[in-house]
């Protein structure tokens, strides 16, 4: 019955979601031209709040739990699992004061209103997953950028989305490069739950009533032991994934 209902509701969601991207695209362009980075940053935050609100049509709710006092005057490396594209708007909105930037596949850099423009001009990096060497170099540039400007790099070390919420093993190279290029960055593990339920049927229809949660674990310092840091981050993220328990 729920899947039948989702066939009815999903088109309304896609209309609102798509219109949001279309409306914000010229606003992003204008914000960058008139106000530079501060302008596009504020607009991107509002865009992603609006994208989150559009998923409320599907009955989606969000909970973001962060009991930690995370400083805003130093770089961060957010390490998190990845369940769907709908992971991203809440991270951008709830972590907005930390200026989150993403490691994204190059295919997202064109053809998507608002999203592609922000990825190209907002400080994120686009990588070619077929070219490992070039990808690592781009990730290194992001590390240098966050170190210089006290921004936040968000990386999904699983490398691809989990279709059922079950965590995949972390791939080490990208995260290690970020830690190497941003030695003063605080590492912040986050566990995401139930985002995969939004796309449990594939691209159409959308899942209904997903209760998506984000749990921020205790941040820790980069002590230069990259293997140890990777294991610690992975253990923290996996510990908070409910489907794994």
Image (cartoon, grey):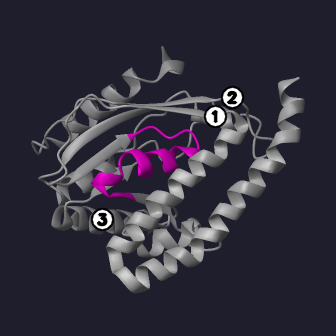
Q: Position of residue 163 (x, y in %)?
A: 63, 35
Q: Quadrant of residue 33?
A: bottom left
Calculate the distance from the C-alpha at mark 3 to the C-alpha at mark 2.
Answer: 35 Å
Residue 221 seen in the figure = yes
Disc on res. 209:
2
- Of the image marks 3 and 2, the number of the one nearer the N terminus: 3
Left or right side of 229 for 25 = right
Position of residue 71 measured from the top left corner of the image (x, y, whole percent)? 17, 46
Instruction: Give the extent of the magenta segment.
Output: 80-101
Q: Nearer the viewer, residue 142 or 169?
A: 142
Query: In this rendering, is residue 108 above or below 85?
Result: below
Q: Tag 3, which secondary structure?
A: helix
Residue 93 is one of the magenta-drawn residues: yes
Q: Position of residue 127 (x, y in %)?
A: 46, 66
| Residue 93 vertical placement versus 130 (above, below) | above
Residue 169 x/y as whole percent: 44, 34
**Mark 3 highlights which residue?**
142
- The front one of 123 and 173 is 123
**Is residue 171 magenta-colored?**
no
Q: Give whichever of discs 2 and 1 has the lower sequence position.
A: 1
Residue at mark 3 to residue at mark 1: CA–CA distance: 32 Å
The numbered dot on residue 60 is 1
User: The residue tagged with tag 1: helix, strand or loop?
Assistant: loop
Using the image, tell me which numbered label, if any, was put on residue 27.
none
Pick out the residue farthest to the bottom. 33
> Contact (CB < 8 A) between labels 2 and 1?
yes
Q: Viewed as shown, does residue 140 lie left or right of 3?
A: left
Disc 3 and disc 1 in contact, CB within 8 angstroms: no
């Amino acid at each position: 019955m729920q899947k039948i209902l989702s066939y009815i509701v999903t088109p309304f969601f896609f209309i609102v979601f798509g219109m949001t991207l279309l409306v914000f695209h010229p606003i992003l362009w204008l914000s960058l031209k008139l106000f530079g980075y501060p302008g596009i940053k504020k607009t991107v935050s509002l865009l992603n709040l609006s994208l989150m609100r559009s998923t409320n049509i599907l009955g989606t709710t969000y909970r973001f739990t962060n009991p930690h006092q995370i400083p805003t005057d130093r770089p961060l490396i957010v390490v998190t699992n990845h369940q769907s594209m709908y992971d991203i708007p809440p991270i951008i909105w709830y972590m907005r004061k930390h200026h989150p930037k993403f490691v994204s596949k190059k295919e997202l850099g064109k053809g998507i209103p608002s999203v592609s423009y922000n990825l190209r001009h907002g400080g994120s990096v686009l990588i070619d997953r077929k070219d490992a060497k070039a990808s690592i170099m781009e990730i290194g540039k992001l590390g240098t950028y966050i170190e210089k400007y006290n921004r936040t790099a968000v990386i999904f070390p699983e490398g691809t989305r989990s279709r059922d919420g079950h965590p995949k093993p972390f791939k080490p190279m990208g995260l290690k490069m970020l830690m190497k290029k941003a030695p003063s960055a605080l590492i912040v593990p986050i566990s995401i739950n139930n985002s995969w339920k939004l796309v449990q049927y594939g691209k159409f229809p959308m899942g209904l009533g997903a209760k998506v949660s984000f749990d921020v674990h205790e941040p820790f310092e980069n002590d230069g032991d990259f293997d140890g840091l990777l294991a610690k981050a992975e253990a923290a993220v996996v510990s908070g994934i409910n489907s794994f328990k």
